[in-house]
Structure formats: C-alpha cells, structure tokens
Amino acid sequence: MTVHQNPTVTQASAPIAGRKAVNLALQGGGSHGAFTWGVLDRLLEEERLSFDGITATSAGGVNAVVLADGLAAGGREGAKELLRTFWKKMSDVTSSSIIAPSFIDKMNPNFGLDHSPGYVMVDMISRFMSPYQLNPMDMNPMRDLLNEVVDFERVRQQKVVKLFLSATTVRTGKVKVFANEEITAEHVLASACLPFMMRAPEIGGEHYWDGGFMGNPALFPVIYACESQDIILVHLTPTERNENPQDSRSILNRMQEISFNSSLMREMRAVAFVTKMIDEGKMTGAKRMFIHLIEAEDVISKLAGSSKMNADWKFLTYLFELGRGRADQWLAANFDRVGVETTVDLQAKYL
C-alpha cells in the first residue's frame, strides 16, 4: 500500500511578518534519528519559524526528504503526519526482521540489542564477510520503504525548502552534496550507507558511503545557497564519553563517533574563525552565521551503540518525546536570539 499524497507541488509561501527563517542541519544516527523526528515535530508547530534550507546526512537525510515531501503535499500538518507514518512503518518492518530486539533487550534501559540472536549473528558475520558476499542481489528494505512513503518526484520539484544530502565518494574520499532536483531513494541510501552493512550505491558512475565520514552534516551548502544566517543543528553523535571503551564492539562504536564528528568540528572551527574576523573588523563582505544546537547527549551517550539498529516502537517514541521536549526547551530559551546571536558555545562544544 502506498501512502503517496496528491502530487501537487507547493511553492514557497510569502514571508510572514514576525516569522524567522532558519536552516536545519540534521545529523545521522540510525534509529536515534527518531530524536530528530521529535525535534522536527515540535518545530513544525512553531508558527514563528520557517525553514529556508535543510542539510542532512544518513538518518537526518531520511527525515529531511520525508519533511520536504510532507511540507510540499500538506503543509506543516502534512509533514508531521508523514514523518510519523514513515517511522511507524520502519518500526513495523524491523519488528519482523532478524535484528528485532529480544524480550531481554526490551527490558534493558540502554535499548541495546546484545541479547538479540539475529543482531549478534549479523554483527559477527559482518566482521569477515562483506555486503557484496552476503547480499548479492542488493535487496534493501529501506529502499522499498522510502519509495513507498516518499513521492520523490514531488521532492525534486518542490520549492518549499532547499534540500541538501551529504554522501562520501568512495573513490576520492570527498564529500558529495545532492540537491533537491536530483534526489531519489538511491541518493538517500548513498547518504546512509554504512560500508559493512550495505552495498555502496552507484550514482553517475561513482559509489558512495555514509555522508558522516566527510559531512555529518556538511554546513557549507546552507551557508552558500540559503539566505538565512541561522543554522539549527540537531546533534545526535556524542562528542564526549567519560568511559574508556575496552571491548571490541564499544571500541568500534567510539571510533565511528569520533570519525563522524570530525568533519563537523572542522566546519565549526571555520565558522568560529570567520565570525571572529568579522567581529574584529578584519573581514568584510562575508556572511555572518548564527549557530544553534538542539541535542540530548546526556541521554544518548548512555544508550548502547547497538541501539542505533533498534527500531522497536517503544524506543522510537521514547526518542521522539525526548526530541519534542528538547526542542520545546530550546524555543523557550532561545527563540528571541534567533537572527541576533549564536546560542551555543562553539569553543566549549566543538573546538
């Protein structure tokens, strides 16, 4: 059953007095993207905000295309409904898969999959067999789900919000940014391709891995291509962990976290440098950016690394409500500062 809505393409609406336009930057993080879903659900209720551009990677890219399609088809309520539809369908598909959480996993407060026989087996096999050996037919339930829920023709044609998805070019190691007019389900998969879990999508003769390696997400597309000076970053990947990982699984998880935050930290350093030069009068003509942050590192850092593969509905709705709550707190504390100043300590958080 398809849930594509009326293919009408909504054009960008005229600015509303008192409404502030922002850009969104959405990180990847597997099932943790349900936190971003909650953030978006709350921001969509805030009539004082509008969205200029969205730059996203991996699970952030999934949320971004669903949001853009929902906005184009049915406005803010349409976007809220389509986001919920996608996440519920993803949970339903995963609940019958081999990596579904066991009864013991569902009782675990860190929502890991350590007691899921299917997950443990897949995790072990992926250490010595590649997706090309394990999945020669390139079957991918996520591809099917995206094509069922999202009308990609409408996403490519809509003018409601500028869309940018980051992927990593396998051959060159450079970041590749896909924009509205070219995005299909394959581009979303390219942005979300974990090399040990799925085959690298081929687009235009190039193969792509997860955008997190080179842009999680890349900020420069909305800096250069959007008018808004404000970026609200929804940060999912923990920057700090107090414990020293000692088993192989936690070591690999921490290595990935550090890798996936590295490109973002480099861009934040550049933003901070340019801002300092502008403020000191040493640079003219540059665009001054205001950076904002919505996160829940205090909670997400306590989740098991394997929880990124856990799509149990109870877990997803837990993250959803957490995201709504953090977005609500951010709006109450910082809305008046949008368009005026950066509301996150870049030095402490990223530099």
Image (spheres, helix red, strand yellow):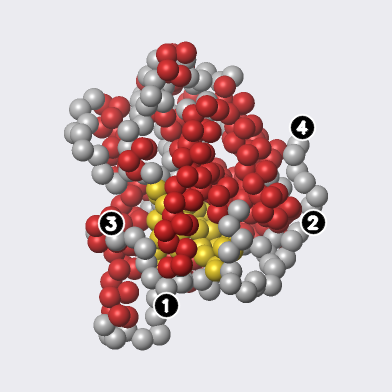
Callouts 3 and 1 close, C-beta under 8 Å: no
Residue 1 - label: 4
Q: Earlier in the sequence, mark 4 or mark 1?
A: 4
Nearer the camera: disc 4 or disc 3 = 3
Q: Which residue is mark 2?
A: 8
Q: Quadrant of the N terminus?
A: top right
Q: Earlier in the sequence, mark 4 or mark 3?
A: 4
As measured in the structure, the alpha-carbon distance from the residue carrying label 4 to the one carrying label 1 is 46 Å
Callouts 2 and 4 close, C-beta under 8 Å: no
Whether residue 218 can be seen here: no
Describe residue 26's horizontal placement relative to residue 185 as left or right: left
Judging from the image, what secondary structure is the residue with disc 3 in? Answer: helix
As measured in the structure, the alpha-carbon distance from the residue carrying label 3 to the one carrying label 1 is 20 Å
Tag 2: residue type?
Thr
* Residue 249: % across, % down: 30, 27
* Residue 6: % across, % down: 80, 50
As measured in the structure, the alpha-carbon distance from the residue carrying label 3 to the one carrying label 2 is 42 Å
Q: Relative to 143, is 291 above or below?
A: below
Q: Earlier in the sequence, mark 3 or mark 1?
A: 1
Tag 3: residue type?
Tyr
Callouts 1 and 2 close, C-beta under 8 Å: no
Residue 287 - label: 1
Q: Which residue is mark 3?
A: 350
Q: Earlier in the sequence, mark 2 or mark 4?
A: 4
Judging from the image, what secondary structure is the residue with disc 2 in? Answer: loop
